[in-house]
Amino acid sequence: MNTDSRFLKACRGEPVDRVPVWLMRQAGRYLPEYRKLREAHPFLELCKTPALAVEVTLQPLERFGMDAAILFSDILLLLETMGADLRFDEKLGPRLRCRGVREGGDHGLKVPDPERGLGFVLDAVRQLRKSLGQNVALIGFSGAPFTLATYLIEGGTSRSFLDTKTFLYRNPASFHRLMGKLADAVQAYLQAQIAAGVQAVQLFDTWAGILSPDDYREFVLPYTQRILSALPADRVPTIHFSLGTSTLLEEMETLGAGVLSLDWRIDLGRARQRLGPARPVQGNLDPLALFQPRDALRSTVRNVLGKGASMPGYVFNLGHGIHPKTPLESVETLVETVRSFPATPMQAGAP
């Protein structure tokens, strides 16, 4: 493992020479080289062909020189391996079918052997570790149990999450069983990625913010804690991301994640004060701020940097994934602005 990576140091709260930067969904549709590949290959083919997944993963590094690479894949591939039927509709997005889940159980779902069911992901990880430079860390990831459960129950994306909440409230015991099986699968998947060579892992619980604090504590917190406690956090930093969870910040502090990745709906400076200097954070520029004029964008990025870098342990990122229509020059401006931002005395380890 490359212990000298700027990104890994920041995740551990150690001194860095400057703030590291990478972007969620940095490999994807906003890049012309990615769109060219997609003309020849369906999305799932890109995900399931290691050489293509490696190529896509490296594209934003070659163009922008990010401090970390995140494996090109999709959180729903794990559900497919567990027994769900998965397809991607160009207009509607991902569509899933899993017999029995909506009726109140985890029927038909199995906890897969990652090497057998997701070996193509692990092969891509092994190839990437040979391709990446000494200063670039490789991030693996998975969807968290609750977010995966919403896709299973809703059959895809949702705005109201009516089916998910109806299931949760009417069949709490069945919902807990489903969460337990998903937690076992996610834990095994992340452990396999670590064994294959990823140097940090990010757990995406994108939709956890739809829950009240009480429901979050009952139905989500124990399963996320179980996963994170089983990972070797002493050598592989763990990052937790969710949307709209500023009301759950104190609960998320108990998850066991090394880094909390925050969305743009919370002031980063206030979040750091609530969490304290011992908690590294990541975030949290609004992805649509990248549509500002260049000078305004520089100012906005510096504002986020000033709040995030007020304490050690800070990684610059967006508050969610980059929008497919984002101008390339805006990403260039963002990266240049972060690189030119001086490290604070605390960040650099000065007395």
Image: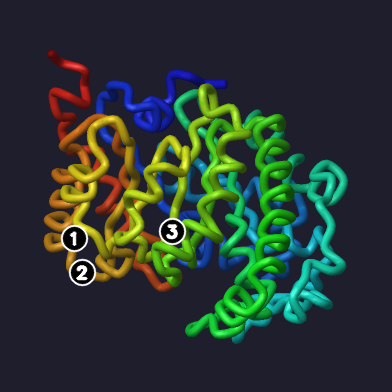
Q: Which residue position is annotated with label 2? A: 292
User: Tag 2: residue type?
Assistant: Gln
Image x and y of residue 261, in percent? 38, 49
Find out whether the residues at labels 3 and 2 contact each other: C-beta distance under 8 Å.
Answer: no
Quadrant of the image occupied by residue 279 = top left
Q: Quadrant of the N terminus?
A: top right
Find out whether the residues at labels 3 and 1 contact each other: C-beta distance under 8 Å.
Answer: no
Image x and y of residue 229, in percent? 57, 35
Residue at 36% x, 66% y is 244
Residue at 17% x, 48% y is 269
Q: Which residue position is annotated with label 3? A: 242
Residue at 28% x, 64% y is 286
The crowd level at tag 3 (other Cα within 10 Å; few <14, some 14-19, many 20+) is many
In the image, residue 10 sits, relative to residue 104, either above or below, namely: above
Any part of residue 51 in sight = no
Any part of residue 273 in sight = yes
Residue at 46% x, 44% y is 255
User: Tag 3: residue type?
Assistant: Ser
N-term-proximal mark, 1 vs 2: 2
- Foreground: 326 or 201? 201
Q: Nearer the viewer, mark 3 or mark 1?
A: 3
Quadrant of the image occupied by residue 310 = top left
Q: Which mark is residue 297?
A: 1
N-term-proximal mark, 3 vs 2: 3
Label 1: which secondary element: helix
The crowd level at tag 1 (other Cα within 10 Å; few <14, some 14-19, many 20+) is some
In the image, residue 265 sits, relative to residue 279, either above or below, namely: below
Image x and y of residue 61, in percent? 47, 43
